Image (spheres, helix red, strand yellow):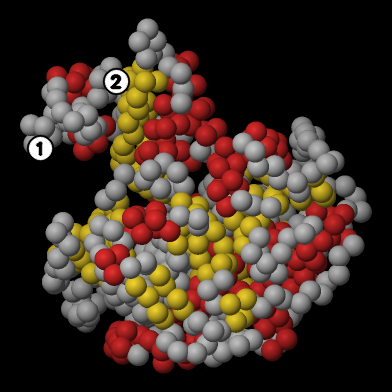
């Protein structure tokens, strides 16, 4: 890898930041990067010394095969070592590092004034109690537990309780539908579900228990009954449920309309169970490569993939990326605005920050509720120093101008981060100039559910910044840019972004489907992990992500499969065929533009359009609701019957330059679609 020290030195941190930074210069970054590639055992061995190991590893730090032509793909890290990640992020911090009284989380509810502070000692006690609850319900090492909860402290408690006893958590974002929850429970064969009665997202009430019950009924209908469902009372608290300070407080907003269905044969009350549980629980010591969690991400076939992460490598990688990318210092207050239902919340709300003994803000609400200043009010309230959010949130807030931001001081901020999608230079400049007042370096991080942690990222005091670039590889990561033939391109080039070797935090398999793992990530270019993203490398060696190469969409930082949306639309009796493409959106990055061919005799109407949108919402979740649906009596297809999505993307964007369409079976279809485009404004 050639690491060229960039000629243009865009601001990268105040003098104060450089003085205290873990990596204070580009030269230091280069030195450590080369060590991580040339002497990985020594590099990662030094990191591992900060953690507790019940048994030490023997042999190579990392063993792997990335070449499908040479046998099964595998990655093994620290074989022979055993530990427990919950012990490392809680017990080790409380007992060895004496951080028991340090705040682990400032919980900020949806309603301003709804708040709670939880220390490391309190968190350890709550986790032990709930671990004992899980054990009392028959959960044992290796069992999968499904968690479907809002952004409350108990979500962190539930996930850490699972890993304390060696169980594997599978968290499903609380914005997903009952169908999505059912699909994930079935795929990972979960033995128990943990959920809550409901929650507010801004003004909107979500009856989570109703959705959970619907999902469990679907599971029963498919021959997989779940016998236990533990429900947290978040909105429907009764007096005397639990001492305040040990659970989330009742929400300030009254909730008289919440109907909480209850099945006494399956449902159990979180509070009743915890009340009788001991706050001591011995951790289960697990092998390095034992499964830690499964997290589902959209797949291009339409069926979500259960990405499996394992213990030791993920722990080391999230701990180190958090420490260096945010330049974590002991007096920091860190806030990542993501939901724990996504990988960002797993790695950079729970595991990375807690492994470093950090204090974090855990936020239940929305950036625009009750007004568009909410984020900056929270920054001032808790004196947030390191702030991590999505470009889609920045673009949303840009619309309201500077005034809502400048109402608050924000003088505590030191580092700003972005995650979820490439940030466009205009949003980068606004974030840098308006939010950070040109004082704070921006770490624009590129990574995936599959990578476990940051793989291309700036470091706050070390990397000169270029707005919109993911800059350089993190330690242990070796990127390459390939052309269509799989040849590595040198210097400034554009092509497929791949990685040549594993790093500790990379996924190990698709749960229950090793074949799909190998086909998706390793078959196209044997010897490389294929990200599915296009990439441009400039003359200085900076990497620029150009977007998905496969049939995936990035909507508000969340990856959606076009096939998944198409199959949801096609399930409606009125739809014969559907094709979905992305169209640029000023806030969300991409919006969903859907073409539907109706069955004979059916007329397109506003009512049908509303039904189709509802169908997608129920099948996948609100995040996948189509922005535009166009009636398409015919779709542009090749003579072999393949839909030409490239042409559909042009139609969606009203771009007449179609390139070569000689393979089209019927070119008249295209003109008809152009004439009947949805009226999309700009």
Residue 538: % across, % down: 17, 68
Asked where in the image residue 242 lies, by quadrant, the reply is bottom right
- Please give left or right for residue 549 compared with residue 575 in the image: left
Asked where in the image residue 504 lies, by quadrant, the reply is bottom left
Q: Earlier in the sequence, mark 1 or mark 2?
A: 2
Residue positioned 21% across, 38% down in the render? 646
Q: Nearer the viewer, residue 286 or 339?
A: 286
Q: Is residue 571 above or below residue 38?
A: above
Q: Is residue 468 above or below residue 480?
A: above
Q: Which residue is mark 2?
A: 632
Query: As drawn, which residue projects farthest toward the front?
Result: 71
Quarter of the image that includes the C terminus: top left
Residue positioned 41% across, 45% down in the render? 560
The kind of secondary structure element at disc 1 is loop
> Any mark on residue 259, and which?
none
Q: For the residues marked 1 and 2, what is the alpha-carbon distance in whole angstroms?
A: 21 Å
Residue positioned 60% across, 47% down in the render? 185
The kind of secondary structure element at disc 2 is loop
Quarter of the image that includes the N terminus: bottom left
Q: Nearer the viewer, residue 669 or 543?
A: 669
Query: As drawn, which residue projects farthest toward the right?
Result: 240
> Any mark on residue 659, and which?
1
Asked where in the image residue 475 lies, by quadrant, the reply is bottom left
- Asked whether the viewer can see residue 291, the reply is yes
Residue 395: % across, % down: 40, 49
- Please give left or right for residue 520 compared with residue 223 in the image: left
Q: Is residue 639 above or below residue 327?
A: above
Residue 183: % across, % down: 56, 43
- Asked whether the viewer can see residue 587, the reply is no
Label 2 environment density (alpha carbons within 10 Å; few <14, some 14–19, many ≥20)? many
Residue 292: % across, % down: 57, 67
Q: Nearer the viewer, residue 335 or 576?
A: 576
């Amino acid at each position: 890898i050639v690491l060229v020290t960039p000629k243009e030195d865009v601001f990268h941190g105040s003098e104060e930041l450089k003085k205290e930074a873990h990596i204070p210069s580009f030269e230091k970054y280069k030195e450590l990067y080369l060590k991580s590639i040339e002497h990985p055992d020594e590099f990662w061995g030094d990191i591992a010394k900060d953690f507790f190991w019940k048994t030490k590893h023997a042999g190579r730090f990392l063993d792997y095969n990335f070449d499908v032509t040479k046998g099964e793909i595998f990655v093994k890290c620290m074989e022979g070592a055993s530990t427990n990640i919950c012990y490392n992020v809680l017990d080790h911090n409380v007992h060895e590092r004496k951080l028991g009284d340090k705040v682990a989380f400032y919980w900020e509810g949806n309603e301003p004034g709804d708040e709670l502070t939880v220390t490391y000692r309190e968190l350890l006690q709550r986790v032990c109690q709930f671990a004992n609850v899980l054990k009392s319900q028959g959960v044992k090492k290796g069992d999968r537990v499904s968690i479907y909860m809002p952004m409350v402290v108990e979500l962190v408690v539930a996930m850490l309780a699972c890993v304390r006893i060696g169980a594997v958590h599978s968290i499903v974002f609380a914005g997903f539908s009952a169908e999505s929850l059912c699909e994930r429970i079935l795929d990972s064969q979960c033995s128990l579900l943990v959920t809550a009665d409901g929650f507010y997202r801004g003004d909107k009430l979500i009856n989570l228990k109703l959705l959970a019950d619907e999902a469990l009924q679907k599971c029963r209908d498919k021959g997989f009954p779940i016998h236990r469902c533990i429900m947290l009372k978040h909105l429907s608290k009764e007096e005397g449920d639990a001492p305040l300070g040990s659970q989330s407080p009742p929400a300030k907003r009254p909730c008289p309309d919440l109907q909480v269905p209850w099945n006494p044969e399956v449902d159990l009350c979180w509070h009743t169970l915890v009340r009788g549980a001991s706050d001591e629980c011995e951790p289960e010591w697990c092998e390095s490569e034992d499964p830690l969690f499964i997290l589902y991400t959209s797949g291009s076939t339409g069926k979500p993939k259960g990405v499996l992460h394992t213990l030791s490598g993920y722990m080391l990688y999230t701990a180190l990326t958090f420490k260096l990318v945010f330049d974590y210092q002991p007096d920091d207050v860190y806030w990542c605005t993501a939901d724990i239902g996504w990988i960002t919340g797993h790695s950079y709300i729970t595991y990375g920050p807690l492994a470093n003994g950090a204090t974090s803000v855990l936020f239940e609400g929305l950036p625009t509720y009750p007004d568009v200043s909410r984020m900056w009010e929270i920054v001032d309230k808790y004196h947030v120093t390191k702030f991590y959010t999505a470009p889609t949130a920045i673009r949303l807030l840009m619309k309201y101008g500077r005034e809502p931001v400048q109402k608050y001081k924000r003088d505590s901020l030191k580092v700003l981060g972005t995650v979820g999608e490439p940030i466009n230079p205009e949003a980068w400049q606004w974030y840098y100039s308006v939010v950070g007042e040109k004082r704070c370096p921006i770490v624009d991080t590129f990574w995936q559910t599959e990578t476990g942690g940051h793989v291309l990222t700036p470091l706050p005091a070390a990397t000169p910044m270029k707005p919109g670039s993911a800059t350089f590889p993190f330690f242990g990561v070796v990127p390459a840019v390939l052309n269509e033939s799989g040849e590595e391109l040198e210097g400034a080039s554009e092509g497929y972004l791949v990685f040549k070797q594993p790093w500790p935090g990379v996924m190990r398999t698709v749960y229950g489907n090793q074949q799909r793992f190998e086909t998706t990530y390793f078959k196209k270019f044997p010897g490389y992990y294929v990200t599915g993203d296009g990439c441009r490398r400039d003359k200085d060696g900076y990497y620029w992500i150009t977007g998905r190469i496969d049939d995936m969409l990035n909507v508000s930082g969340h990856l959606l499969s076009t096939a998944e949306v198409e199959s949801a639309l096609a399930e409606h009796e009125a739809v014969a065929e559907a094709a979905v493409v992305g169209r640029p959106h000023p806030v969300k990055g991409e919006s969903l533009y859907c073409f539907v061919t109706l069955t004979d005799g059916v007329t397109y109407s506003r009512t049908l359009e509303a039904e189709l949108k509802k169908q997608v919402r129920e099948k996948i979740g609100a995040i996948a609701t189509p922005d535009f649906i166009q009636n398409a009596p015919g779709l542009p297809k090749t003579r072999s019957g393949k839909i030409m999505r490239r042409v559909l993307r042009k139609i969606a964007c009203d771009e007449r330059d179609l390139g070569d369409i000689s393979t089209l079976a019927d070119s008249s279809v295209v003109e008809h679609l152009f004439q009947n485009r949805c009226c999309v404004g700009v």
